[in-house]
Amino acid sequence: MASLLEGQLFQISGQGPPPAKDFFQLAITKNEIIWTSWKISLRLENRGIPPKQMKITHHDFQQHKMLQKEVFTVFGQRILEYTISLCEGKYDYLERLSDEILCRILSYLQLSDTAVVAQVSQRFRKLCNSEMFWKQTVRTCSAGFTRDMEDISNAMGWRTTYFTFFHVSNIKEQQ
């Protein structure tokens, strides 16, 4: 599993809260936290100022209350908690899987189960509503999937295809 933790574990960027319009980026690697900030200002004396960057270890971040407060102010409680959990070594391996693999796994679940999975996070909600997911679901439901069926599905949408042709038969099979 450790091989899944190569490179960046997490990255987020965004604008800080008003009245300042500064821009921030939080990057978390296997060994350190990288906090970068850009000063956004119309004042002439602030033009051309390079971004500030702070690199600290996970252990130091856990002790650095001012930086934690800054992360909270810019990105909110959820991102701060996620950052702290990564620093503690609590990795979410499921989040690190590609969309293609997750869609393949999701396509084998019952539709009622995918409705619950879609409530887990924004990523899972997007996946459960994506064409990629519905394409996998239709292909899983149909043993004799033909090129004509694929053309129809591409034209009318994979989700619509599922509910038009397969949803009723799946309900009957489950009963």
Image: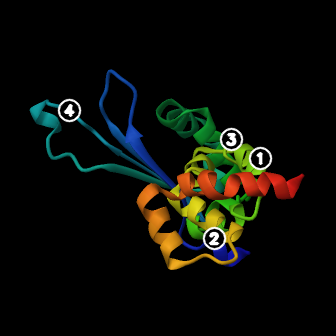
Circle 2 residue: 139
Query: Earlier along the polypeptide chain: callout 2 or callout 3?
Result: 3
Disc 1 to disc 2, C-alpha distance: 18 Å
- Residue 104 horizontal/vertical position (percent): 66, 69
Disc 1 to disc 3, C-alpha distance: 12 Å
Disc 2 to disc 4, C-alpha distance: 53 Å
Q: Does dot 1 land on a helix, a strand or a loop?
A: helix
Q: Which mark is residue 112?
A: 1
The reply, left or right, for residue 14 in relation to residue 165 is left
- Residue 102 horizontal/vertical position (percent): 65, 64
Q: Residue furthest right?
A: 175
Q: Which residue is painted at 75% across and 57% down in the image? A: 169
- What type is the residue that disc 1 sits on? Ser
Query: Earlier along the polypeptide chain: callout 4 or callout 1?
Result: 4
Closer to the camera: disc 1 or disc 3? 1
In the image, is residue 41 above or below residue 103? Answer: above
Circle 3 residue: 119
- Residue 174 horizontal/vertical position (percent): 86, 55
Q: Which residue is painted at 54% across and 52% down in the image? A: 160
